[in-house]
Amino acid sequence: MPANTLVFGLRRVGAGAIKVISRLGFAARFFVAVLLHTPSALRRIQLTLREIYFSGVLSLVIILVSGLFVGMVLGLQGYDSLNKYGAGDSLGIFVGLALVRELGPVVAGLLFASRAGSAITAEIGLMKTTEQLVAMEMMAVDPLARIVAPRFWGGVISMPLLAALFSVLGIFGAYLVGVSLIGMDSGAFWGNMRAGIDFWPDVTNGIIKSIVFGVAVSLIAVFEGYDAQPTAEGVSSATTRTVVGSSLAILALDFVLTVFMFRGTGVV
Amino acid sequence: MNRATIDLWVGVFVTVALGAILFLALKVANLATLQTVPSYRLEARFDNIGGLKLRAPVKAAGVVVGRVERFRLDAKTYEAVVTMKIDNGFHFTKDTIGSILTSGLLGEVYIGLDSGGDTAMLADGGEIAKTQSAVVIEKLIGQFLFDKAGSTGSVK
């Protein structure tokens, strides 16, 4: 019956919409709960330091190597294009602005989501599957304070630091290519960069972005882990959702933040 | 992984990353703009400020001595009123000429200050009386074509 199919189809759409909205609401309440458990997590700072080690220190290799290569490619491509207009000396300002404002926070955020976010989701999801979280509750240990809040704050603290390191390594990579390989003047490279980049607002905007991305990625990672279906398949799909969801969140937030940061400067 | 090793690595990570932020602030960006160098304000009226931007440099003999703080249109005279922040170390005579210049053909627009021989100096909030507006290329070409057409017409 076509009428029945229509009703069935509408019911599916409705159920899907309700599921999305209730998950959003759950995520928002979860965020508030994590924030409320922050003081008890900070009181045992050792737990957070451990998470900074796992999300921050262990992500260093991929962040530093990617930053270096992104910077070197930017140096080559940028010099090639700029030199066509006789502006090869502006390589420093081009690379610096691109890294500090955009590529540092965004690429470091994407790498962080796939390197650390997925690990956090898989860890919490597996704890849920093996009923460790329930066991903790039985022992009157709140898993939000003991497990979730330290991982959240570990990610939030690590992300801006990783983004700054990414930018610095990228600029160093561009310096290697521009000055050592192509042979442009090192004074022009640094001088133009310093003349064209301001601490306020260029560098600070990049730092604000990386902090926002850190909150978004860490929240999505801990939420997906905590909300995962307690099966092997559930943990695997939760990990996938973390990487896809946080990557999309980073790109969407980046656009929104960039529009706000450009307001009043004559661009928007 | 024991506790002391984790603490050590986190300490190294945080220190190096804060160093990176410091590097971005001092070596990549010019943090000098954040320092509150004591400064005073000068005003100047221009018929046309062309492509002047906020925070554009104010230069004397090519050296940056301040920045454009804000500009607005005077509703009565239809002149642009530009407010500049000049570093306290530099003072200019009352007959200083302010002109809107461009560095190179496509370069940034800045305000050039040329001091005169007056002994009295401009104080905080003072106004630069003599100004030279931005050169608008379209007007210049239009004028040139007009003159050209006029001269060829008179010869014939």
Image (cartoon, coloured by chain):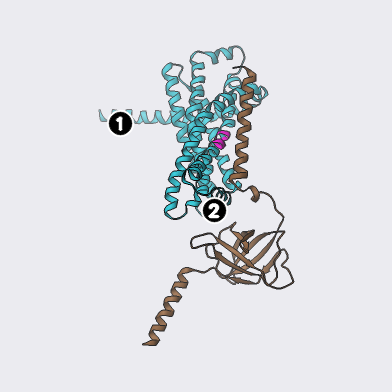
Chain colours: A cyan, B brown
Dot 1 amino acid type: Leu
Residue shown at the point (61%, 43%) measured from the top left: B25
Residue drawn at x 57%, y 40% as measured from the top left = A208
**Residue drawn at 49 percent across, 68 percent down:** B136
Considering only vertical position in the picture, is A166 above or below A115? below
Question: Which region of the structure is painted magenta?
Answer: A160-165
Reading the image, the residue beneath label 2 is A265
Q: What element carries label 1?
A: helix
Question: On screen, B54 above or below B78?
Answer: above
Q: In this view of the protein, which residue sits in the foreground, B106 or A233? A: B106
Residue beneath the point at 60% across and 44% down: B27
Tell me, yes or no, if residue A268 can be seen here. Answer: no
Residue A94 x, y percent position in the rendering: 50, 48
Where residue A7 sits in the image (x, y, percent)?
32, 29
Secondary structure under badge 2?
loop
Q: Label 1 belongs to which residue?
A: A6
